[in-house]
């Protein structure tokens, strides 16, 4: 197999030598043979030494590296990568069993597959391409995934309508690449939820909060809990299993509230401790009383790009300040940011400013991050996107 070649400018190979998986457009001197969007290309240094192979794309990230070895990107390659990903999830004990069958199988760069995200819910893989290259490779990836997972994989649902750049006009589509009759209920740590990949955001359910929900459960006994930005209600039903006194779930989306109610009903039918409200978070926080002892703030990414970072940090500060003002003395705040461009330090600073504004005594009990099935490639620190703090507020 021969691939078209890209040559870097002199001295622009440093980050690839450190195995960082992106090539920025500014680093490229010239391309041989006019590679197309999504095509597999080989990358060479200015000295004409092979250094990487990856998917080309138009934009500031010009190449997403698939391998630093000179190898073919063929069936064997996809099998090798997906096998490594699957073995890790098996080691983590997430794959089968009555307690858990929901996990992230592929976490982009964290699994050396830049541009690909795959979540699995009860044997159904929900696959998202974030790059044209992965979009073109979708059938090959699906075939390799089935070969690697065997009976552990029953369906593959491809969902890339919202993750691929529209400009690229790739014929984005959502639909099954394998199977079609999917079990709609999955299990996380023994709790059930409807995996709604058809209508839900992203791949349908955020498995990245699994460990943090478990921690919350331990703090819930006897508490009045407010789950702000509840989406599918994950934190809410963990709090209920942890014997919370009452749980209020809030989300501005009516669909999210419907899902939350459905999921709570699935685990705790007819339980009067839970109530859900379709209201804007800021409004709810302004109007609520001061009777919550445990508050979860898990907002959507406030910053999707570097240029809006300042606004995002102000957003986190404003939001957290409202919670600090209202939380009961001795209360516990679980506060998160899932913006990749907001660093751990920046997030902590925003929360610090919010705490100072409220004048309350605040102590950090836990510093949280994403779970092991969202691994961080050590050469791609940008992959660490989820940050959380558990705070004790006097
Ligand atoms: N905590 C959830 C994930 C939250 S995703 C979990 O564990 O799965 C972010 C959610 O915030 C989405 O459901 C979105 O509808 C909601 N949201 C966005 N803006 C909001 C606002 N201003 N007020 C309330 N909810 C909002």
Image (cartoon, rainbow, N blue to C red):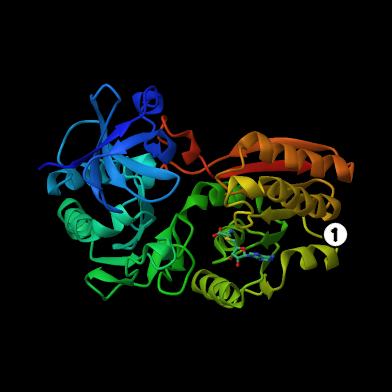
Q: Does any portion of residue 77 appear in the rendered image? A: yes
Image quadrant assignment for residue 4: top left
Q: Position of residue 147 (x, y in %)?
A: 15, 54
Q: Position of residue 264 (x, y in %)?
A: 55, 70
Q: Nearer the viewer, residue 288 or 48?
A: 48
Residue highlighted by disc 1: 290
Q: Residues within 10 Å of mark 1 (few under 14, many from 20)?
A: few
**Quadrant location of the N terminus in the rendered image:** top left
**Horizontal side of residue 347 vs 18, given as left or right:** right
Q: Secondary structure at mark 1?
A: loop
- Within 8 Å of ligand 1, the CB of disc 1? no
In the rendered view, tell whether residue 326 sits above or below residue 167: above
Q: How many marks?
A: 1
**Horizontal side of residue 33 vs 392, given as left or right:** left
Residue for point 18% across, 56% down: 140
In the rendered view, tell whether residue 184 sits above or below residue 17: below
Residue for point 78% across, 58% down: 292
**Quadrant location of the C terminus in the rendered image:** top right
Residue for point 87% across, 46% down: 358
Q: Does any portion of residue 203 appear in the rendered image? A: no
Residue for point 62% across, 73% down: 253
Image quadrant assignment for residue 197: bottom left
Q: Position of residue 343 (x, y in %)?
A: 61, 38
């Amino acid at each position: 197999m021969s691939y078209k070649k890209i040559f870097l400018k002199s001295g622009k190979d440093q980050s690839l030598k450190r195995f960082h998986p992106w090539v920025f457009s500014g680093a490229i001197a010239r391309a041989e043979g006019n590679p197309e969007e999504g095509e597999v290309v080989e990358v060479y240094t200015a000295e004409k030494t092979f250094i990487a192979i990856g998917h080309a794309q138009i934009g500031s990230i010009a190449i997403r590296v698939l391998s630093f070895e000179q190898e073919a990107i063929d069936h064997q390659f996809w099998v090798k990568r997906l096998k490594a990903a699957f073995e890790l999830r098996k080691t983590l004990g997430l794959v089968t069993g009555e307690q858990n069958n929901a996990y992230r199988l592929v976490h982009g760069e964290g699994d050396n597959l830049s541009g690909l995200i795959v979540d699995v819910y009860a044997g159904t893989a929900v696959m998202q391409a974030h790059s044209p290259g992965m979009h073109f490779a979708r059938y090959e990836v699906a075939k390799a995934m089935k070969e690697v997972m065997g009976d552990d994989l029953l369906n593959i649902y491809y969902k890339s309508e919202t993750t691929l750049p529209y400009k690229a006009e790739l014929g984005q589509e959502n639909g099954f690449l394998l199977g079609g009759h999917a079990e709609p209920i999955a299990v996380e740590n023994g709790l059930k939820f409807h995996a709604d990949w058809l209508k839900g955001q992203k791949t349908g359910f955020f498995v990245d909060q699994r460990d943090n929900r478990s921690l919350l459960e331990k703090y819930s006994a006897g508490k009045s809990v407010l789950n702000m930005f509840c989406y599918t209600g994950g934190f809410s039903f963990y709090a209920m299993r942890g014997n919370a006194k009452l749980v209020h779930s809030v989300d501005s989306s009516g669909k999210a509230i419907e899902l939350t109610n459905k999921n709570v009903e699935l685990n705790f039918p007819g339980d009067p401790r839970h109530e859900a409200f379709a209201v804007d978070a800021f409004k709810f926080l302004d109007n609520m009383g001061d009777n919550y002892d445990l508050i979860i703030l898990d907002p959507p990414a406030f910053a999707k790009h570097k240029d809006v970072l300042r606004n995002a940090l102000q957003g986190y500060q404003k939001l957290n300040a409202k919670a600090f003002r209202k939380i009961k003395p001795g209360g516990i705040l679980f506060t998160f940011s899932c913006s990749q461009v907001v660093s751990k330090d920046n997030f902590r600073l925003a929360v610090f400013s919010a705490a100072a504004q409220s004048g309350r005594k605040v102590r950090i009990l836990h510093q949280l991050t994403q779970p092991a099935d969202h691994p961080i490639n050590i050469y791609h620190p940008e992959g660490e996107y989820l940050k959380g703090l558990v705070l004790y507020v006097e």
